[in-house]
Image (spheres, helix red, strand yellow):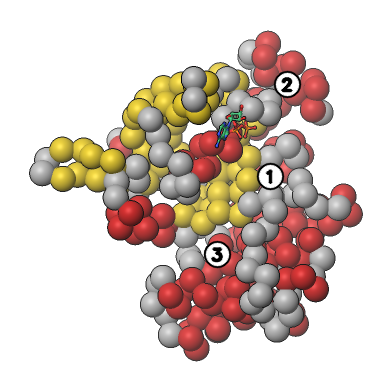
């Protein structure tokens, strides 16, 4: 597989916090339009990967590329140097993220939550941004809540707004970090159904961290099992869930399924 076909590529990425190595020389690739789910025990480094992709963290060693362009670094005078703020701002435009705890702007209406970044970052006109916001709110089933404030919505509705807000930036990659784990159990299925629809009906590339193994099985083309900052096995969900090769994967799945 040539590098041009890969949408995401980690080469030898190491991330340490103090003397703890959280990712250990990680190589990882994701092809365009694929839906990849990262599974593994708590603390194995899954969220760190999403935070690196979101440029909220930088690798200590190694490089990260999205669409062939360096995310973590930029080329200056023929040399690769750690990326500056301007480069990072441009690079992260391709990437949207939905967090466990929504992180909506509480003092803005639902519609403003969706129009703010498209207007200020992408330079859309307020009318264009509002039209896109309305379409997305329809898609997530909240067409009638555009003028509501986040605090007046249920957790499930807030998470739908957060998903719509991420999509409003038309990212190539959507990162989903445990997006249902803060929700009341009765609200989980609706959000997962919405994400299944998005996976089916759009070209977006998904990278998910989830403990919802049924969802991971449904939505994924590829499941990557992490342990101690390394991918210990990966493959289509049927293989990973029904015939895992590694004892560590069997033990993890035995504990969570
Ligand atoms: P996972 O998502 O697989 O549960 P994480 O990527 O969140 O794992 O975390 C991996 C390890 O890195 C954990 O031991 C966590 O405590 C540690 N860690 C994550 N972020 C930080 C941070 N900002 N400072 C120090 N340690 C961190």
Residue at the limit of the structure toward the bottom, as seen here:
127
Cβ atoms under marks 1 and 3 closer than 8 Å = no
Q: Nearer the viewer, mark 2 or mark 1?
A: 1
Label 2 beta carbon less than 8 Å to ligand 1: no
- Which comes before the other along the chain, label 2 or label 1? 1
- Quadrant observed for ligand 1 in the rendered image: top right
> On the image, numbered disc 1 is attached to which residue?
178
**Residue at left offset 41%, top offset 59%:** 93
- The residues bearing labels 1 and 3 have C-alpha atoms spaced at a distance of 17 Å
Q: Check the picture and name the quadrant holding the N terminus.
A: top left
Callout 2: helix, strand or loop?
A: helix
Whole-percent x and y of residue 163?
A: 63, 61
Q: Is residue 106 above or below residue 59?
A: below
Whole-percent x and y of residue 204?
A: 51, 55
Is residue 74 or residue 224 the one in the foreground?
Answer: 74
Q: Taking 251 as reference, is 236 left or right?
A: left
Label 1 beta carbon less than 8 Å to ligand 1: yes
Is residue 193 or residue 117 the one in the foreground?
Answer: 117
> On the image, numbered disc 2 is attached to which residue?
252
**Residue at left offset 81%, top offset 28%:** 257
- Which comes before the other along the chain, label 2 or label 3? 3
């Amino acid at each position: 597989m040539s590098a041009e076909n890969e949408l995401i590529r980690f080469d030898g990425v190491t991330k340490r916090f103090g003397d703890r190595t959280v990712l250990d020389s990680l190589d990882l690739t994701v092809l365009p339009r694929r839906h990849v789910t990262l599974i593994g025990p708590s603390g194995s480094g899954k969220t760190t990967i999403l935070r690196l992709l979101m440029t909220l963290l930088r690798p200590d060693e190694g490089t990260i590329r999205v669409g062939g362009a360096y995310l973590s670094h930029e080329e200056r005078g023929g040399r690769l140097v750690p990326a500056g703020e301007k480069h990072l701002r441009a690079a992260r435009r391709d990437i949207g993220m939905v967090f466990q705890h929504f992180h909506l702007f509480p003092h803005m209406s639902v519609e403003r939550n969706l129009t703010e970044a498209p207007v200020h970052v992408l330079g859309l006109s307020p009318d264009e941004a509002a039209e896109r916001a309305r379409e997305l709110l329809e898609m997530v089933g909240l067409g009638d809540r555009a003028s509501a404030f986040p605090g007046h919505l249920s957790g499930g509705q807030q998470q739908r707004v957060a998903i719509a807000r991420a999509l409003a930036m038309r990212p190539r990659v959507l990162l989903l970090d445990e997006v249902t784990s803060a929700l009341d159990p009765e609200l989980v299925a609706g959000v997962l159904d919405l994400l299944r629809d998005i996976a089916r009906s759009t070209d977006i590339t998904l990278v998910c961290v989830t403990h919802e193994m049924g969802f991971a099985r449904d939505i994924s083309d590829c499941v990557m099992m992490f342990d101690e900052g390394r991918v210990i096995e990966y493959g289509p969900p049927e293989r990973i869930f029904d015939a895992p090769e590694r004892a560590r994967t069997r033990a993890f799945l035995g504990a969570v399924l």
